[in-house]
Amino acid sequence: MKHFEKIGDWLSNIFLPESNDTIKVVVLCVVTATTFWFFNALNDNYSTRITYPIKFTFPDSSLVVVNELPKKVSINVSGGGWNLLRKTFWFTITPVEVPLEDPVSQNYILGNSLYTLIADQMTEIQLNYVENDTLRIEIDSIRTIKSKLSVDSSKIDLEQNFRIISAIQKSHDSATFSGPERFIKKVPKEVFIEIDKENISSNYSEEIYLPTFGSSLVNRNPVEVKISFEVAKFIKQELMLPFEKINAPEDSNAYIFKDSLARISFRIQEKLAGNYNLDSIRLVVDYDRINEADSTVKPIIKSLPEQLKEREIKIDSINFQYIKP
């Protein structure tokens, strides 16, 4: 009783520091009555809902849990107040092990199927029923695939007038992907690495993470690949150049060309512009290619300097007039 008196004095000093002795006595009585009621109530039987720990087990190590499995189940139980209090707050309860025979094809488990497993483990309290209707299970087989790694140069975002001038180098030509089969099925035989950088105007060299195809459970080897290539700025050039004539017919004098120069245009790397010999560009007009219908002929390129080879060169047609002798 002295213990309860101390508790009463402590509470009254906190909440009623200026109160008189009568109020302190009332507070002490309320605390004492509440305590007796609480301990007496624990001797009665009750029905209530509690959460009970469960643990799913499966023997195959080649399986992986896709989404976290349920760790608790709600159950309705009956028992004495003291026993319910211990099961709810005071003691760690050993989880009920739920074996899965075919976890890959088993997408769920019915809550009432756990009744016997939980009831066999319970002591001191009575299991009435399992409140959960269904527990979702997502477990999948582990699968591994090897894919080729590529880069689609047409999807690389370059700044205007810039072009790639080297081969695209990759630190790895292939990669392996391992994880849940449902995600590995999405991995194509050729994986295109996406370069997110925009308006590239200088030589590129970066490590790029390979995709996980929708799940962090997908393991990649390697995880990232180094991509590098060179770029340069290109400018447009136009030249007016003389041309030679070949395969002239007997009445070649009847063909009067309106221009003595042909115009060609192309794009060339900026630092190479002008660093070539114009005399090495040879244009030829072949009389056999003359289009009599519209009185035009397009010159043919016979020779180019190395700097202009493999360039896309546009040549304007030359107009002429045919005057019968």
Image (cartoon, rainbow, N blue to C red):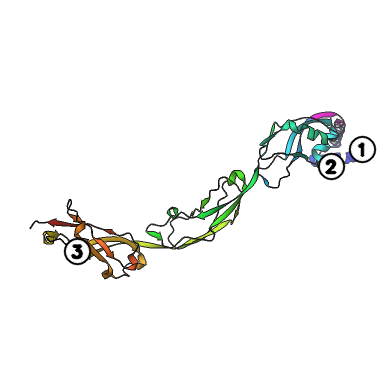
Task: Please state the extent of the stretch shown in magenta in the rendering.
Answer: 37-47
Say few, some or many: other residues with alpha carbon within 10 Å of mark 1 (under 14 / 14 to 19 / 20 or more): few
Amino acid type, residue under disc 3 in the picture: Lys
Residue at the image point whose x is 66% and y is 36% from the top: 107
Which mark, residue 245? 3
Amino acid type, residue under disc 1 in the picture: Met
Q: Quadrant of the C terminus?
A: bottom left
Q: Quadrant of residue 157?
A: bottom left
Which mark, residue 10? 2
Q: Residue 215 placed where, x, y %?
A: 60, 46
108 in relation to 170, above or below: above
C-beta proximity under 8 Å, tags 2 and 1: no
Left or right, 275 with respect to 81, comes to left
Q: Mark 1 — residue?
A: 1
- Is 80 inside the magenta-drawn segment? no
Report the mark closest to the observer, 1 or 3. 3
Q: Residue 273 placed where, x, y %?
A: 33, 67
Cα distance in 3D space between marks 2 and 3: 119 Å
Which tag, 2 or 3, sits closer to the chain's start?
A: 2
Which mark, residue 169? none
Left or right, 36 with respect to 69, comes to right
Q: Quadrant of residue 295?
A: bottom left
